[in-house]
Image (cartoon, grey):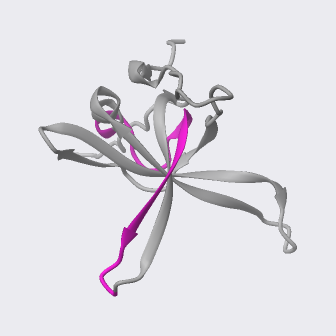
Amino acid sequence: MTKAPEMTDERAEPKPDGRAGGRGINQVALVGRLARDPELRTVGDGVPRAWFVVAVPRAYAGKDGDREADFINVVAWRQLASVVGEHLQKGRLVGITGRLQVSSFEAQDGSRRSTTEVIADQVVFLDAPRKPAKTDG
């Protein structure tokens, strides 16, 4: 059995923030399945950016007995984004480590909105890619 590919963003190493009292901790670990194919785009000076959503099942069932899931926005940058965009698709099982980032923006209607996403430092492929369906002919 081959080891699953693993990519790490070397910029993710913790750095002192310079404030009294030391560093805070902002660390996230997720295991779930891609809810849709990643969107790979190039931004700024040609920097690859992949955006995708991971469905993470909750540990408990709801009142109806079904397990609910949280759908979490994830962003990967640079080489990690390129690997995600090339190798992942809807339904793939992944492990992700990274940090939470909250951003705010002004919507078209003038209201202030915020979004929370995980900035991925590492994405581990936890399953094999699906084989394409065989076609006769």
* Nearer to me, 2 or 109: 109
What residue sits 49% from the left and 19% below the top?
Answer: 13
For residue 99, above or below residue 125: below
Towards the viewer: 1 or 50 = 50
Tell me where residue 95 sits by quadrant.
top right
Question: Residue 131: where, in percent of width, then height?
Answer: 40, 36
- In which quadrant will I find the N terminus? top right
Residue 72 as seen in the image, left or right of residue 90: right
State which quadrant residue 61 falls in: bottom right
Q: Does 20 sit left or right of 75 as displayed?
A: right
Q: Which residues are magenta?
A: 85-109
Residue, x 54% and y 36% (percent of image)? 94
Establish if 76 lies above or below 72: above
Task: Locate residue 135 relative to residue 6 in the image: left or right.
Answer: left
Q: Is residue 95 magenta?
A: yes
User: Quick one: which residue is furthest to the front in this view?
Assistant: 20
Residue 50 image offset from top left, x and y in percent? 32, 44
Please provide percent x and percent y for residue 58. 75, 54
Look at the picture and state if 92 lies above or below 97.
below
Q: Residue at x 44, y 20 (%)?
A: 5
Q: Residue furthest bottom?
A: 109
Q: Is residue 126 magenta?
A: no
Where does the image place residue 68, in percent across and percent down from the top left?
Answer: 72, 63
Q: Nearer the viewer, residue 65 or 17?
A: 17
